[in-house]
Image (cartoon, rainbow, N blue to C red):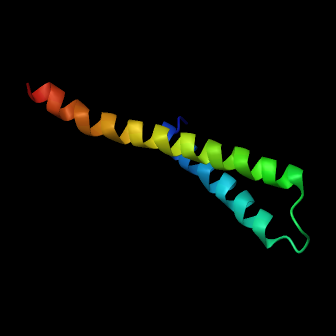
Amino acid sequence: MMTDPASTIRREVDQLVELQIQTFRQESSLTSSDLLDYGMRAEKIRILYQELDRIGRRRFELPSSRAS
């Protein structure tokens, strides 16, 4: 069974966001490593959302290309 690329990306974003939330729920202070990991996940989330945006735009552009 093949999955839609957007669905796969959304699942990955959901997992990363959940890790971000868990990071801030920690009882202890964040370490430098925690902050570095947080920043890297934030960047990955940003990149994945850009990819979702690109996929969405492509889906809407395809029908108009065929109509020409």
Instruction: Give the residue displayed 91% in from the left and 71% down from the top.
Output: 28
Residue at the far front: name it. 32
**Quarter containing the C terminus:** top left
Between 48 and 15, the one lying in front of the other is: 48
- Image coordinates for residue 52, horizontal then vertical, percent: 45, 42
In the rendered image, the vertical position of residue 55 relative to residue 35, given as above or below? above
Can residue 30 be seen here? The reply is yes
In the rendered image, the vertical position of residue 54 relative to residue 45, given as above or below? above
Instruction: Give the residue displayed 48% in from the left and 37% down from the top.
Output: 51
Tell me the quarter of the picture where residue 18 sits. bottom right
On the rendered structure, is 31 left or right of 40? right
Instruction: Give the residue displayed 60% in from the left and 50% down from the top.
Output: 13
On the rendered structure, is 44 left or right of 1? right
On the rendered structure, is 38 left or right of 17? right
- Image coordinates for residue 39, horizontal then vertical, percent: 71, 49
- Image coordinates for residue 36, horizontal then vertical, percent: 80, 47
On the rendered structure, is 32 left or right of 9? right
**Quarter containing the N terminus:** top right
Residue at the far bottom: name it. 27
Residue at the far left: name it. 68
Instruction: Give the residue displayed 87% in from the left and 52% down from the top.
Output: 32
In the rendered image, the vertical position of residue 38 relative to residue 50, given as above or below? below
